[in-house]
Image (spheres, grey):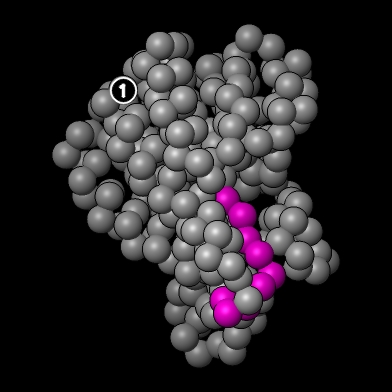
Amino acid sequence: MRSAVVTGASSGIGRELARLLCKQGFRVLGVGRDVGALEELRAELGGAFELIACDLRGLGCVGNIASRVAASYSPLDMLVNNAGYGSAKKLVEMTAEEVSSMTVVNFVVPLVLTRELLPYMRSGSTVVNVVTAGIHILMTRAPLYGATKIALHYASEALRRELREKGVHLLEVFPGVVKTRFHERAGLRAPMRGVPPEQAAKAILDAVAKGKKKVYIPWYIGFLRLLGPYLPALY
């Protein structure tokens, strides 16, 4: 049976990925802070889903995940670095702790977790890093979020080459606006329109199956790569 680790599994895209992966025959280890939401998901999905409730702002959580994978999920077929959050604060308004915490969750943890779980991943497995299409524009309403995701994108480009030597594939995901609680939690106005998280999760797994290096959700948001430098601050 194939196995996967999904961070940020208690809501949004991560929750839907856990559902789809279990339906596809995976054993899924879901990581998140919302114990109640994770327990609900386990009740729904049964023995195919197990959980680790921990806060990724503390790197000790990475050690807990690695220990569980070594004991029960090796060889590992997929790691989805999906956990992340933003804040509707100007950079000069953020405390040192806020800057550090967001940088750890959005940028540091995906790299450290990949390094820690790589020994348990076999050739043909996949690392999925969820970035954002917003890196192609100036995200003035959530600037630190944009900065941490640009850092993750830069690192992913280098990491893809390093993982290739191990036979491990890396997929970068660039979502546009997705109908989750991200905006609400960040203190941003909820968007009028957006992609359902179920659609985003399906697009990610389709891209994994096709061996793609990058996927934009929806596909046309990829035009930001070309238009972004000519657009005003839109977010």
Nearest to the observer: residue 103 or residue 135: 103
Apparent side of residue 192 relative to residue 217 in the rendered image (left or right): right
Q: Does the magenta stretch include residue 91?
A: yes
Residue 129, above or below 70 = below
From the top left corner, tell me how far across and down residue 210 is, in percent.
41, 40
Q: Is residue 138 magenta?
A: no
Apparent side of residue 130 relative to residue 153 in the rendered image (left or right): right
Q: Name the quadrant of the C terminus.
A: bottom right
Q: Give the range drawn in magenta.
A: 84-92
Residue 30, above or below 46 = below
Apparent side of residue 118 relative to residue 202 in the rendered image (left or right): left
Q: Which residue is drawn at 44% across and 54% down?
A: 107
Nearest to the observer: residue 100 or residue 141: 100
From the top left corner, tell me how far across and down residue 84 is, in percent.
57, 51
Residue highlighted by disc 1? 120
- Asked whether residue 39 appears in the rendered view, the answer is yes
What predominant SS class does the magenta segment belong to? loop
Q: Residue 123 occupies which quadrant of the picture? A: top left
Look at label 1 and name its amino acid: Tyr
Q: Residue at x 60, y 71 (%)?
A: 94
